[in-house]
Amino acid sequence: MAALEIDTVSKSFGGSAVLKAVSLDVRDGEFLTLVGSSGCGKSTILRVIAGLEPQDAGAVRIGGRPVDHLRPKQRNVAMVFQSYALYPHMSVKDNIAMPLIMQRLRLAERLPLVGRLSPRRAKVMAEIDGEVGAVARQLHIEQLLARKPAQLSGGQRQRVALGRAMVRRPDVFLMDEPLSNLDAKLRVHMRTELTDLHRRLGVTFVYVTHDQVEAMTMSDRVALMDEGRIVQLGTPADLYHDPLDLRVARFIGSPGVNVLPGTVTGAGVEVGGAQLPLPVAAAEGAAVQVGLRPETLSLDPPAGRPVLKIRLSATENLGAEVFLHGRADGAGDSPIIIRAPLDAFDRARAAGRLDGTVTVAVDPARAFVFDADGRRVGRRPVEAAVVRMPVPAE
Amino acid sequence: MTAPSPALKPTAGALFKERLRLLRPDRIVGGLVAHLVLIAGALFVLLPFVWMLLTSVRKPDEVFTAGFNPIPDSFHGVENYGHALNQSPLLQFMGNGVIVCAGILVVQLLVALPAAYALAKLEFRIRPLLFVLVLLGLTVPPQVTALPLYMGLASLDLLDTYFAIMVPFFLSVFAIFLFRQFFKTFPMEIIHAARLDGFTELEILIRILVPSALPAIAAFSVFSITSHWNDLYWPLVVTTSPEHATPPLGMMIFRDQETGSNYGALMAGAAIITAPLVITFLIAQRQFVRGITMTGVK
């Protein structure tokens, strides 16, 4: 168990910078997720931590100890890969045992025939067998130990890969999109199983995914990455309710955030005819982008709150809630989604307020205002910025 | 989310339609033409071989007089094969062939597998340059280096040894290229996992890549064994004594010394020395085809 520090790490491949002075502190025992679209550098960070790719600049410390000069196996980290990366011709048992065999047997003892001459080999192998068995029981794969990876289903391979990582009791667990090759149902199941595993092991997890749902549901903290930088680091709730950047607001949440063009006025922000009384740190008349989460738009009568007029084009009834798709009148005709609880939808329909257009009430306190570059301006609780924002270096 | 679709089993009707489709006249003609071409090709390739087998059981006087009658009038095989085996040290030639081919193959694999791994999976600055050199090596015919090699061996007093027959072939550029292409397709993630688990680079090669590359290794082995078993040129250059003669060279010595124009016995000898190759290929056939088509690992 150990904390992990990544200190202004940069890395480029053939002239294109993949990591630009990334800094990140992962606390001991924390489940931290790196999320971002493909090519944002999140997998590269994992490989730098593991020592599989040397960084061009910066340092990595595990448990306060610099590891930059150490080879991958000496860093005591374990990694689960997207393709599981099981050794194809070895049995499940050998796959799981390999890290221990490599750790505990000397080079000569690992040789095919000569190795058997060593008196301590049999004892070590018996110990390893016991530990492999224990891990297999924990993951419920005891009955698969004799099989080859090709004879396993995706979920089973996933467990074997986890077992191979667990057996060596690493300080840090690195996971590179471990669930993306599973079918949807199994993925949901493995999410809870992984968080469960994290709780039981109490080890530091660094988890990479492009799926914001995984990031939101599993992590203690999430770091959203884009173009080789960490855009925001915070709890899942921070990223959802208090995004510091338009990219964060857009990436997190499903259905995605509504973004409408607005203008800064003396009293706040004007968007689609609605006046949002928000203190905005921008010059009057400046163009801004206003982010409104679909569930913050209310179908109930406005009761004095600012309103938007929306032309409806489609409704999706999901049972417990309803998604209404439309376009915002007067706000650049931007597409907009309203997420309403079923009872609110029923009330509005009964009151005849859904006749092709609908008037929705906006909660100014839950609106995000971004400047033209996508940076958050306006109401933003300063104490929420728990991020150690990296100094951008060009 | 979606339930797995049931296995698509063709119905009886669909199967019948499929058979009907195969029976359409244009299909039949097309199939016939294709098979005729294949049969003609096979005959063309196999005929000398068949003729060798037939000649090896003919009487000496029948070899030339029989015209193209494929069936021998009388079976003279025992005499011919007996003559071939008794009058010449055929078994010794074949033993030499085994020693030479095995020696060459072992060293080729020992050199080519690590080299191919480095060229395919390790990062170092001069890798592209080295790979270009390997490709250039493919273009150098063996005759070009024959004279310097001969002189070198002569000055070291190594002529007429097994080593002299084997040494030019120890470094197989073709093997390096073949294995490099195969290793390229091997998933990097598995190699990364192995490095994290504490494998040394050599262990990654031996424990992980080589078992996956067995089809490619089998394919290359067939190429290597065939070409060096059948090679006449280089053994003829560096070997003078029958003690080290490989099968084709032995056949040549055998023809000169003993049999003169006893073609029946000569063909019997040829049949005997070809047999191991045919048997090897039949055993390794499946691996060989798999290795050449290089489906890679899943």
Image (cartoon, coloured by chain):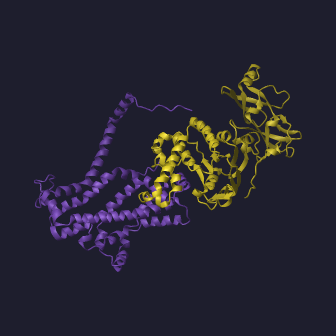
Q: Residue at x 33, y 42 (%)?
A: B30
Which tint was used for chain B?
A: purple
- Can you name the residue that lies furthest to the bottom here? B155
Q: Colour of chain A?
A: yellow
Residue B12 image position (x, y, % from top left):
37, 28
Foreground pick, A208 / A345? A208
In the image, is A79 to the left or to the right of A325? Answer: left
Q: Is residue A198 left or right of residue B21?
A: right
Residue furthest right in the image: A266
Q: Is residue A312 above or below residue A72?
A: above
Q: A240 and A275: which one is in front?
A: A240
- Can residue B184 be seen? yes
Above or below, comparing residue A314 to residue A292 in the picture: above
Q: Work out which quarter of the rendered image holds the C terminus of chain A and state it.
A: bottom right
Residue B14 position within the rendered picture, expressed as x and y whole percent measured from the top left: 39, 30
Out of A91 and A209, give the one closest to the viewer: A91
Residue B80: name its quadrant.
bottom left
Residue A352, position as x, y percentages in the image: 76, 20
| Horizontal relation, residue B208 to residue B83: left or right | right
